[in-house]
Amino acid sequence: MTKIIWQQGELIEVTIANLSDTGDGVGRADDRVVFVPDAVPGDRAIVRLVHVKPKYAHGKLQEILSRSPHRIRPSCIVADKCGGCQWQHIDYNNQLAAKQNQVIQALERIGGFLQPPVDPVLVAPFALNYRNKSTYPLGTSATGQVQAGYYQKGSHQLINLNQCPVQDSRLNPLLAEVKQDIQQRGWQIYDEQRHQGKIRHLGLRIGRHTGEILLTLVVKDWNLSGIETQAQEWLKRYPQLVGVSLNRNSDRTNAIFGSETRCIAGVPYLRENFAGLEFQVRPDTFFQVYTETAEALLQVIQSELNLQGHELLVDAYCGIGTLTLPLAKKVRIATGLEVQPAAVDQAILNAHRNGIDNVTFQVGAVEKLLPKMGTVPDVVILDPPRKGCDRAVIDTLRQLKPYRIVYVSCKVATLARDLKLLCQDEQYTITRVQPADFFPQTAHVEAAAFLVLSDLNKGSNSFNKTEI
């Protein structure tokens, strides 16, 4: 049988079966896979092929012949243009099913695990109005008006927003009005092509439980005429605003924040209550964007570990101690490892604020610190960035052989890769994987994998069981 040759620009009929980890609808036609943005499982559609490969193609939705029962009206009027969300047109239960399937597929295909024990996704309490942090690139319209928003899907065209349905609604007035203040001040918006101008991004952050807000302008240099006066005006206008800062990023880069932040008015942090503790969170601090889901996942971790108070715990990639400090209250000794000195300073401060004295923090790369600990922890928490763990971390853990490992991941592909290495030769067994929805309306999914040392591997390692 002769295989049909697809041509770029050709129209084909596709029925969408599921969703990819990038958020596209996935269908099959002529025994080949077609990826279609903005499509929903259950849609039958006419698709224009825009990028053709021998075994798959990417297409553009041209016409929906029959609508999926999971297709809904988006909450945002620019959802079809803005690249901030991919799934506002998909009902929430179908989003959750897709995310669970994403975790299962990664563990099976990349990790090689047969029927991995993946639980249903931990449901977010709110599918909208949840983000505690938003950072908007700034631009200028054709008529010279200051704009802030997200880039259009697949482009570098800014979609101007005055409100965003996924950020905490208490931030919306600032998003709409601060642009006008920048306009009136005459502050020049940064042009990345020419590397000229002043203001690059507008950052907003809120304590979900305290309501305290930080406003940050990312600037090319510190020279922003009138910023001190404007900062005081913002503090007076917004009672919940506790601090205004500048962050300098003078590099030609797509990174948002630079390495230095200065508080212009108020205080350089907001206070947030998390898991019964009070944290100081700065403008450029890493803190989970969905506070309530992070607390719910922490509860799952605490329940699954069932800590008895005698354990030695190591929290690798600990940040400001978001997981370290609540867990430290339930163990004998806790140690946090973190490469960012500023984060460790905040972690120490947060420990003091909460009267937690059985925890220490060390600055350095995890792959360098972990082998030097001279002890075998009972529990290791891993919460690495999207790239996953350095191979040296995996090798050290396989030599150390802690009894329990909890791997919290924001990218399931690298999670699956690292779990495959940890479980090699059946050294560790995955007892449970708990996905969690930290990013409703998007394809992103967080997951916590629970590993236990296999019985045959206990009791033999080259490290001494001494105190941390």
Image (tube, helix red, strand yellow):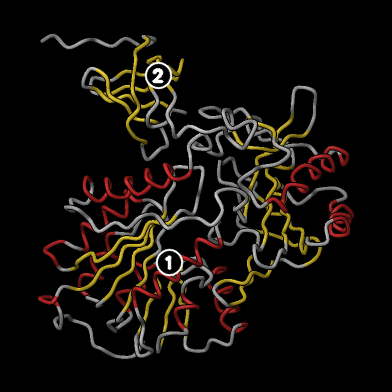
**Does dot 2 land on a helix, a strand or a loop?**
strand
* Amino acid identity at mark 1: Tyr
Nearer the observer: mark 2 or 1; the answer is 2
Which quadrant is the C terminus positioned in? bottom left
Above/below status of 2 relative to 127: above
Relative depth, front residue between 193 and 87: 87
**Does dot 1 land on a helix, a strand or a loop?**
loop
Q: Looking at the image, which residue is at 56% across and 28% down? A: 80
* Amino acid identity at mark 2: Ala
- In this view, the residue farthest toward the front is 69
**Label 2: how many Cα within 10 Å (few below 14, some 14–19, many 20+):** many
**Label 1: how many Cα within 10 Å (few below 14, some 14–19, many 20+):** many
Q: Position of residue 234 (x, y in %)?
A: 84, 55
Quadrant of the rendered image containing residue 116: bottom left
Which quadrant is the N terminus positioned in? top left
The answer to whether residue 466 is left or right of residue 333 is left
Which label number is shown at residue 45?
2
Q: Would you name the residue on which mark 1 appears?
A: 317
Which of disc 1 and disc 2 is earlier in sequence? 2
Q: Position of residue 161 (x, y in %)?
A: 70, 36
Q: Looking at the image, which residue is at 29% across and 75% down? A: 371
Relative depth, front residue between 283 and 220: 283
Relative depth, front residue between 159 and 80: 80
Q: Looking at the image, which residue is at 62% across and 50% down? A: 129
Q: Position of residue 276 (x, y in %)?
A: 57, 77
User: Distance of mark 2 from mark 1, alpha carbons?
Assistant: 45 Å
Total number of numbered discs in the rendering? 2
Relative depth, front residue between 205 and 464: 205
The answer to whether residue 372 is left or right of residue 277 is left
